Amino acid sequence: MTQTILCAIDINRPKEEAHVLEAAKRLADLDDAQLDVITVMPDFGSGVVGVYFKDHQVKAAKDSASEALEKLVSNVLGPDHSKKVRHVVAVGKAYEEVLHAAKVSQADLIVIGAQRPDFKDYLLGPNAARVVRHATCSVYVVRAD
């Protein structure tokens, strides 16, 4: 029985990610599972890029991402269902943060979308492929139309 589902989405692609959210909700409804939705921002605080960003700018970007995530979930699943969803905004490498959030929340299932891959990636994009390869729980990959 599935108790927690983690759905990873990219808030910069709302139309493409809507069907990923819908699939995650359907799966969560089957077992009345908790649905967590995560989006990951790049880590602007590290490396060469970090020198151009102040702490308050990173916080403002994270706050903006949080608002966008809640709006996207509310628009796709409805405001009532969005209130039951745990919204997570992480900063770092997408696949690492998704795997970390799954471990912390003890997710039984990760739902992730597969962007149109480059030929070198064959079937999955690089983040989805890494999540599938390294997850300690089941992963449900939602194909783009």
Image (cartoon, rainbow, N blue to C red):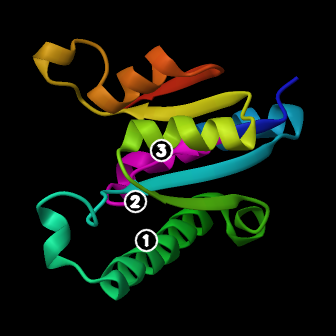
Q: Which residue is mark 3?
A: 97
* Residue kind at label 3, given as amino acid type: Glu
Q: Mark 1 or mark 3: which comes first in sequence?
A: 1
Residue 145 seen in this snapshot: no
Q: Nearer the viewer, residue 39 or 96?
A: 96
What range of the chain is rendered magenta? Answer: 6-22
Q: Which is nearer the N-term, disc 2 or disc 3?
A: 2
Q: Which mark is residue 65?
A: 1
* Tag nearer the camera, 2 or 1: 1
Instruction: Tell me, yes or no, whether the highlighted magenta stretch contains residue 7.
Output: yes
Disc 2 packing (10 Å; few <14; some 14–19; many ≥20): many
- For the point 51% across and 72% down, which residue is it? 66
Q: Specify whether 143 is left or right of 107.
A: left
Tell me the number on the disc at residue 25.
none
Secondary structure under the numbered disc 3 in the rendered image: helix
**Where the C terminus falls, by quadrant?**
top left
Q: CA distance from mark 2 to mark 3?
A: 15 Å
Element class at badge 1: helix
Residue 49 among magenta residues: no
Residue 31, percent from left and from top: 87, 32
Q: Are marks 2 and 1 in contact (CB under 8 Å)?
A: yes
Task: Please say if the residues under marks 2 and 3 sit with CB atoms less than 8 Å apart.
Answer: no
Q: Residues within 10 Å of mark 3 (few under 14, many from 20)?
A: many
Residue 78 vs 5, above or below: the answer is: below
Which amino acid does the dot numbered 1 rest on? Ala
Rounded to the nearest angstrom, the CA distance separating label 1 from label 3 is: 15 Å
Query: Residue at the location (46% across, 72% down)?
Result: 68
Query: Identity of the amino acid at label 2?
Result: Ile
